[in-house]
Amino acid sequence: MRKSLVVAITAISLVVTAPLAIAGGKATPKPVKASSNKSSCSATNAVGHAPKDVVLPTLIKNTAKNKIFTLTTNCGTIVFEGFTSKAPFTVSAMSSLASQGFFDGSLCHRLTTAGIFVLQCGDPTATGTSGAKFTYRDENLPASAQNNYPAGTIAMANSGPNTNSSQFFLVYANTTLGPNYTIWGQITQGLDIVKAIAAKGVAGGGQDGSPAQTIALEKVTVK
């Protein structure tokens, strides 16, 4: 996934250089709940804006329990499970950002409908070139294989190795990519919403660009 942000910091426990001792691989698929409002989107006041200043995240101490993220959007609610034990750095960072309201009132800025099948979010500017002002390492990378990013996967966008920040993508149909993008979650509710957004295509036609149906992260919570 393209993302041109490259901002590194050193005064944060999430930024490390030694190999992470966590096995990669695909998550075991779980049943996904359908949403009752998959085809209905309301108007939103969300617009591109400067990223919010946030306190730097620290590593989650208890990795035995997965985090549950709830994306309240203008098109319905999407819920996914964050893999705390498999991707502790990523889940720590994204939990911190969500708790500080970093994603609230932001637009999902990119939809791809051919070759790869993803909806990309997490850049408050809605340009795909910005995000949080820190980066952290890759982890839980999948094997190089067919459909290594299956439908329902939550993964990080990046601009190269170990440049994760705040942009992430939701996979709505089985996708094959280079094994370069941290897998850190699995959608448990609302995959049908993402599929409905994808079915409406890219604004202005084409296969890669802003979604024709605006979808905004009105609020993101984590518990």
Image: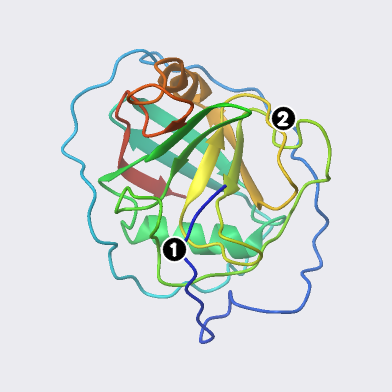
What is the x, y in percent for residue 183? 66, 48
Residue furthest bottom in the image? 11
Q: Which residue is mark 1?
A: 96
Disc 2 packing (10 Å; few <14; some 14–19; many ≥20): few
Instruction: Give the image's coloring scheme.
Output: rainbow
Query: SS for tag 1?
Result: helix
Number of on-image labels: 2
What is the quadrant of residue 75 in the picture? top left
Q: Which residue is mark 2?
A: 29
* Residue drawn at the location 49% of the way across and 18% of the way down: 192
What is the x, y in percent for residue 51? 29, 62
Amino acid found under the numbered disc labelled 2: Pro
Question: Of the residues under marks 1 and 2, which one precedes in the sequence?
Answer: 2
What is the x, y in percent for residue 185? 61, 44
* Residue drawn at the location 44% of the way across and 17% of the way down: 196
Eyeballing the image, is 159 above or below 127? below
Query: SS for tag 2?
Result: loop
Tag 1 and tag 2, C-beta contact below 8 Å: no
Alpha carbons under labels 1 and 2: distance apart: 25 Å
Amino acid found under the numbered disc labelled 1: Ser
